[in-house]
Amino acid sequence: MRQYEILELQFTGEEPSSSKVDVDVSVEVICNGKKKIVNGFYAGNGVYKVPFTARRRKI
């Protein structure tokens, strides 16, 4: 994956029973021993998406 390229993970599941805006979907990304939680959203038709962009930090 190149720097600033977007990786979009997709998951299928049941449609949210209440708010389609307030959903709790996230993934944990681990790189070089550092963890980051990336939140996603409900995209409709039983599809949940979590977009992730890799970027380098200044040292």
Image (cartoon, rainbow, N blue to C red):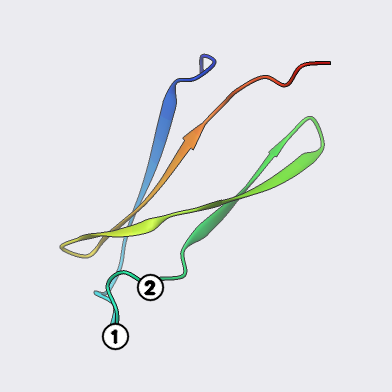
Left or right of 20 in this view: 52:
right
The residue where tag 2 is placed is 22
Q: Check disc 1 and give the amino acid type.
A: Ser
The quadrant of the rendering that contains the C terminus is: top right
| Residue 57 sits above or below residue 51 on the image | above
Q: Are marks 1 and 2 in contact (CB under 8 Å)?
A: yes
- In percent of width and height, residue 11 lies at 35, 55
The residue where tag 1 is placed is 18
Could you give the CA–CA distance between mark 1 and mark 2, rounded to whole angstroms?
A: 8 Å
**What residue lies at 43% left-to-right and 55% top-to-bottom?**
40
- Mark 1, residues whose alpha carbon is within 10 Å: few (<14), some, or many (≥20)? few
**What residue lies at 52% left-to-right and 58% top-to-bottom?**
26
Q: Check disc 2 and give the amino acid type.
A: Asp
Residue furthest to the left: 45
- In percent of width and height, residue 50 lies at 42, 48
- Which of 20/49 is in front? 20
**What residue lies at 49% left-to-right and 37% top-to-bottom?**
52
| Residue 23 sits above or below residue 31 on the image | below
- In percent of width and height, residue 10 lies at 34, 48
| Residue 2 sits above or below residue 38 on the image | above
- Which of 11/5 is in front? 5
Left or right of 24 in this view: 46:
left
